[in-house]
Amino acid sequence: EAKSLGRQKVVLFDPSIDERHQLRLRYEAGLRKAIDNGELYVHFQPRFDIAGQRVVGAEALVRWQSEEYGPVPPSTFIPIAENSRLIVDIGHLVLKEACRQAARWAEAGYPVPVSVNLSPRQLHEGELIRDIQGAIQQADLPPQLLELEITETHLMDNVDQVLPVLHQIRAMGLGLAIDDFGTGYSSLTYLKRLPIEILKIDRSFITDVPGDVDDEVLVSAIISMSHSLNFRVVAEGVETEAQRAFLEGLGCDEVQGFLLGRPESAGKLLGKLRRCDATASP
Ligand code: C2E
Ligand code: MG
Ligand code: MG
Ligand code: MG
């Protein structure tokens, strides 16, 4: 019996699964080395007021320029890191760098909040709160200049576990945003209970507006609902002026996307803050 099962296994052996596993292990080892060698760094994407005039925040987005693989997108390596505790080290690195840069912008006269993506695993590791405290203290950053983003899917799958952590974060004076909204299945009951202030509409809903009536209705409904729950609404992935204008018409509060700014170095972002300031001055 055992023998035949063993043989069956060999027959069912799927090389593509094995290859994927091998690739994953290679990436994992490569990522470990990359962290140690300083191949990971952080870019910042500006978020604008709805008129697209003023930078009201910046999102920290991790980048990996690998010597071996070239640039590796976060959609590839974050899930790998998430599976291997490497995410805790990456999260630490991003948090520290984000706080350091936001403190510099504030020092230069531009106190805009920086937002940092939290991955599920970080939220469940005990060190998170200590990590945050360490990062803001070390950078001497006012806590209200740090915001944390958590995806809707993760929030809703783990509300009971995550909620106490969110309350702790808010009690420290940090901002909280729900990211990629619309891709999960939020219940209004839960949304009402969340101590968040910002809701970011997922890019997939913005792509086809104006024009796609279903998406237009959805975006409009999300904005109304958010406002009635006292959330500020940010639209992600705004690439065209038509999209921005449409969102402005619906009363959306802020926009983020390639139309107004791509992720860039902290230095370039500071340049943008200065230029916007000059333009906005009378
Ligand atoms: P996200 O948090 O929703 O970040 C927004 C993503 O949309 C970024 O992709 C950004 O470059 C992209 N984006 C912004 N505007 C536009 C646009 O107008 N058009 C298009 N096509 N894309 C736009 P990125 O940097 O590749 O990051 C992808 C995801 O990886 C992020 O989605 C986030 O979930 C995750 N991620 C990135 N950095 C970190 C990090 O430091 N920690 C964790 N845990 N996750 C991260
Ligand atoms: Mg985000
Ligand atoms: Mg998002
Ligand atoms: Mg995303």
Image (cartoon, helix red, strand yellow):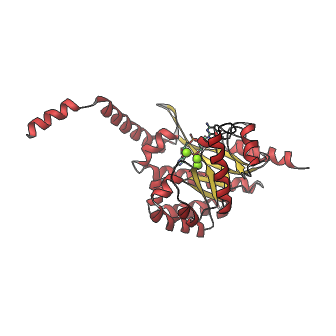
Q: Residue at x 38, y 38 (%)?
A: 24
Q: Residue at x 49, y 32 (%)?
A: 67
Q: Can you say whether 86 is above or below 231 in the image?
A: above
**Is residue 37 something one can see in this rendering?**
yes
Q: Can you say whether 162 is above or below 51 in the image?
A: below
Q: Position of residue 45 (x, y in %)?
A: 66, 44
Residue 107, picture quadrant: bottom right
Q: Can you say whether 50 is above or below 66 in the image?
A: below
Q: Can you say whether 197 is above or below 179 in the image?
A: below
Front residue of 153/131: it is 153
Q: Position of residue 218 (x, y in %)?
A: 62, 47
Q: Quadrant of ligand 4?
A: top right
User: Which residue sits furthest right?
Assistant: 282
Q: Position of residue 126 (x, y in %)?
A: 44, 63
Front residue of 128/76: it is 76
Q: Is residue 261 left or right of residue 8?
A: right
Q: Is residue 232 left or right of residue 91?
A: right
Residue 175, picture quadrant: bottom right
Q: Is residue 21 left or right of residue 274?
A: left
Q: How many marks?
A: 0
Q: Residue at x 62, y 63 (%)?
A: 174
Front residue of 55/8: it is 8
Q: Quadrant of the N terminus?
A: top left
**Is residue 118 something one can see in this rendering?**
no
Q: Position of residue 134 (x, y in %)?
A: 55, 62
